[in-house]
């Protein structure tokens, strides 16, 4: 298993070593020892699978709040997604920024999204299967979301005018600023991470 890191600290891309022969392909898709060597003391306790039938289904942006924050190890076994992880760690120098990467049945990529990130994806093909292991159990009381199209996040979903398919819940998620306004202002003032928006965040929090 190879791995790579990103400009935003925390997420890790795992790429399994594939063994090809006339029958097809074999790969180790998860090894706890290698995962822990790269990530640290994290145990994955639940595995989820979703199948999205229409192309341009967007699920997200989702996270669980304390005390049930989740890290997620995401992969695709059929189809392709554009995977998005937004840094929502209030004191992070990259608060509000995101990483974007394509995961597909062909590239076998696995993205580790640590606690402190909101996660979402757009399916780039019909009938896309996403499988992900998580580091804490599902807790409906701690289920949280951010609007996929929050303009402050500046995510280019590459929809090119197409309407995404969304759950009712995801059509009504709040903007980041509604959830994190005070911390955003503090983080922005401390790190100048959101240059240009600082005045507006201060105004909206009354600081
Ligand atoms: C996430 C989850 C949902 N459910 C139930 C709740 C609901 O009835 C049904 C569908 O849930 P959702 O609409 O939240 O499913 P979905 O929109 O696919 O939610 C997922 O989106 C991606 C982007 C993530 O990162 C995941 O953590 C998760 O939030 O499944 C569970 O039973 N266990 C779980 O772990």
Image (cartoon, rainbow, N blue to C red):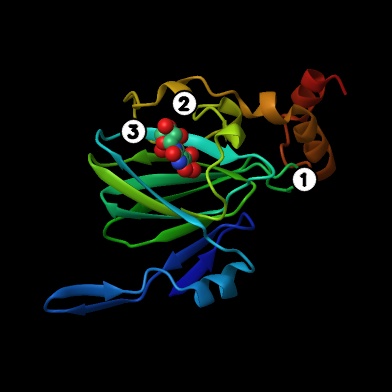
N-term mark: 1 or 2: 1
Q: Residues within 10 Å of mark 3 (few under 14, many from 20)?
A: many
Q: Position of residue 111 (x, y in %)?
A: 47, 57
- For image coordinates 31% across by 74% down, the residue present is 27
Mark 2 Cβ and ligand 1 under 8 Å apart: yes
Tag 1 near tag 2, CB within 8 Å: no
Residue, disc 1? 91
Q: Secondary structure at mark 1?
A: loop
Q: Quadrant of residue 63?
A: top right
Quadrant in the rendering for residue 178 = top right
From the viewer's side, name the closer residue of 197 and 30. 30
Nearer to us in this view, 128 or 98: 128
- From the viewer's perspective, is residue 95 above or below residue 184? below
* Residue farthest along the right direction in this orientation: 207
How far is mark 3 from mark 2, CA to CA? 11 Å
For the N terminus, the image quarter is bottom left
Please rate how many residues cluster around mark 1, counting C-alpha atoms within 10 Å: few if below 14, some from 14 to 19, many from 20. Answer: some
Q: Quadrant of ligand 1?
A: top left
Q: Secondary structure at mark 3?
A: loop
Q: Nearer the viewer, residue 45 or 122?
A: 45
Q: Which residue is mark 3?
A: 57
Q: Are marks 3 and 2 in contact (CB under 8 Å)?
A: no
Residue at x 56%, y 26% (from the top left corner): 151
Is residue 199 placed above or below 97 in the rendered structure? Answer: above
Quadrant of the image for the C terminus?
top right
**Element type where label 2 sits in the image:** helix
Asked if the residue at label 3 sits under 8 Å from ligand 1, the reply is no
Quadrant position of residue 165: top left
Number of the label disc, if any, that sits on residue 170: 2
Is any atom of residue 120 visible in this view?
no
The residue at the point 51 percent across, 67 percent down is: 4
């Amino acid at each position: 298993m190879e791995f790579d890191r990103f400009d935003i600290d925390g997420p890790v891309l795992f790429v399994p070593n594939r063994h090809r022969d006339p029958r097809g392909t074999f790969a180790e898709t998860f090894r706890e020892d290698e995962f822990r060597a790269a990530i640290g003391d994290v145990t994955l306790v639940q595995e989820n699978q979703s199948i999205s039938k229409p192309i341009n289904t967007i699920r997200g942006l989702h996270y669980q709040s304390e005390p049930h924050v989740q890290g997620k190890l995401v992969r695709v076994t059929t189809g392709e997604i554009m995977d998005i992880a937004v840094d929502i760690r209030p004191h992070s120098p990259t608060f509000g920024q995101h990483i974007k990467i394509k995961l597909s049945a062909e590239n076998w990529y696995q993205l580790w999204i640590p606690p402190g990130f909101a996660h979402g994806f757009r399916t780039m093909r019909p009938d896309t299967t996403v499988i992900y292991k998580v580091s804490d159990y599902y807790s409906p009381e701690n289920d949280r979301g951010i609007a996929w199209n929050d303009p402050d996040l500046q995510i280019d979903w590459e929809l090119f005018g197409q309407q995404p398919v969304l759950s009712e819940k995801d059509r009504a998620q709040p903007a980041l600023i509604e959830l994190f306004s005070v911390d955003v202002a503090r983080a922005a003032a401390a790190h100048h991470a959101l240059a240009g928006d600082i005045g507006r965040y201060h105004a909206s929090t009354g600081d």
